[in-house]
Amino acid sequence: MPAWCQQKPASLWSRNTFDATALPPGVMELKTRWRARNGDNPEWSAADYDDNQWPAASLDKAEAAAIRPGWRWYRIRVALPAVHEPLALMIVGPEGSYEVYLDGTLVPGTSIHSRWHSYTSREHVIPLPAARKTVTIAIRVRFPDTDTQTYGLALSQVLLGPSDAIDARSRLAMEDRLVTWLPSAADVLATWLLGCVAILLFFLRRNSREYLYLGVYLVLSAISLTTFYGVLNGFVPNMWNGLGDPLGYPEMILMIEFTYVFLNRRVGRGWRAFEGILLGGIVCAALLNLGVLPASAYLLIEGAFNVPFVLVLPALLLIWFLRGNQDAGWLVLPTLATALSNVVIDLGLVGQVLGLSRLVQIAQPVAVGPLALNIQDIANFCYVLGITIVMAFRFTRVSRDQARSAAELDAAREVQQKLVPITMPATPGFQVEAAFRPAQEVGGDFYQVVEQPGGATLLVLGDVSGKGLKAAMTGVLAIGALRALAAEGLGPAELLTRLNRELAGTDHDGFVTCLCVLAGQSGVLTVANAGHLAPYRNGEEIALDTGLPLSLTPLAAYAESTLTLAPGDQLTLLTDGVLEARNQAGELLGFDRTAQLSTQSAEAIAQAAQAFGQDDDITVLTLARLASS
């Protein structure tokens, strides 16, 4: 028989003995007749210790609300039936934070650990000694400096009854904790899933940072909720919450970043300063876990950190929505749900610190049938549901816009490929080569090689200001007008004059530079230039009369210059994407290198410029007179 089961006579018993001689078939709760005292003294565990001067206590909510950090002892004497079957106790309290003494002897399996390795309220079964008429129970508890109301760290219940009934009650209590945990588990699981989906969407769309901020926020929130509810329901040690609680501060930072990126706004200096303050909250949480910062002070600090996030962010969203930002309206309700949850929790924390029981009750779970729903569960569910709807609409809308943009790009690319010839027409006496390298999906450079009456060949090279789809569509417009004018057999100067009038009459922005060359079979070239780079002949730049770029004014006029290509000579036309190619050091390709490259083939020139560092559309057109001519 263990030492604590041996009868020890008491010289002086408490006058307040709990009468359990008429023990019912089930279990009996030892709720009243307790004596309690703050402090710690090993003599208080003795069976014959006189506790008559101790204040009376009842294990109820009032007792739990009065608890303060530190040591506290509970004592009670229980009168048992004269004849009874094996009996047991079930104690519901902060496991790892209390010791139980039966008739002055410590019960094995009950011990006090550090607050990191203790648990919140859990049930613990202790068999009672057989053939005993009375038993003195002394419980030594160390209450940590933390929120005992939220985490159930009070000594809340002691049950007495037959061992079988107590075991059944213990299993039922465990099942109750599981049932209580189910709504929270579903909430946490939904948060995990949505966070992973958001991060996956970011990897699919790297330019959509709102998915990254939202995903990381939800994952951190899921980790924090997992640790919180695990500790709250007694499934994991308290140390887990010490790891999860500091995550609330980066969560708020990520929510701010998500909101501003989602609405395509820039975070202001005020919010940046607040984000820096929130990082200080992580330090405060660490000091709390190390025991340096009192829990009461930390709870007030935590509540103060929540105020701008809780009040200002929803207010800003509502203001932006009223000013016409429809996306802000989508975020108002989800953010408001989280804000109201934080307000309720903060009021509960303030009530805990100030001893205001009504405020404490505001943050308590809400009973819904057999379930107890926490305010965080309800608010987080509303947020997850709302943000899922918001992101579904955003994803659908962005997908639709991207599909439309992709279709437009494909159409523009197809048009451009048709209008920028891949194969050259027959050019008697000449060899024509071209190379085209757009800086983006489509480019604003264009060129045309058109056969003219009498065996002549018309070469046109142009460059639209800007890049991308808008520049490409302007190039398409220029090429369409150019082909129509080339069919009239106009000379280079007249062609550019007419083309300028056509473009100046449209509503497009920017301008177009253009170089027009009419090559006769004899090698005589007639050239007109509208603000474009001068061509190169055999590596030397040719000075030409240069007019204004196209579309700046409908009154512009252009002059013609004449030059001759001897057999074996090469004329090279190129856009400024070659000249302005820039390497990693920021150095331009420049005129000298361009002149040296200009004697090579069109493909070789384009490749060299692209390898140097492409920054703009690159187009090269070469006209070489054959030696047999």
Image (cartoon, helix red, strand yellow):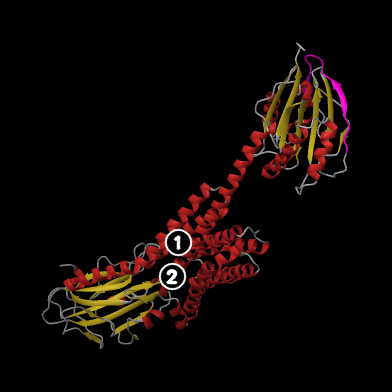
Residue 559 belongs to the span the image colors magenta: yes
Left or right: 9, with 477 as reference point? left
Label of residue 378 in the image: 2
The image shows residue 338, relative to residue 258, as above or below, that is below
Rendered residue at 18%/73% (across/down)? 165
Please name the amino acid that badge 2 sits on.
Ile
Left or right: 516, with 585 as reference point? right
What predominant SS class does the magenta segment belong to? loop
Front one among 486 and 255:
486
Using the rendered view, name the quadrant where residue 150 is placed.
bottom left
Answer few, some or many: residues within 10 Å of disc 1's Cα (few below 14, many 20 plus, some between 14 and 19). many
Between the residue at mark 2 and the residue at mark 1, the CA separation in whole angstroms equals 16 Å
The image shows residue 134, relative to residue 299, as above or below, that is below
Rendered residue at 30%/87% (across/down)? 52
Q: Earlier in the sequence, mark 2 or mark 1?
A: 1
Q: Looking at the image, which residue sits at the far bottom?
A: 15
Q: Looking at the image, which residue sits at the far top?
A: 628
Front one among 58 and 456:
456
Total numbered labels placed on residues in the image? 2
Q: Position of residue 130 (x, y in %)?
A: 14, 74
The image shows residue 558, relative to residue 150, as above or below, that is above
The residue that mark 1 highlights is: 224
Q: Position of residue 558 (x, y in %)?
A: 87, 35
The magenta segment is 557-571
Left or right: 66, with 26 as reference point? right
Please name the amino acid that badge 1 sits on.
Ser
Q: Position of residue 456 (x, y in %)?
A: 78, 23
Which quarter shows the C terminus?
Answer: top right
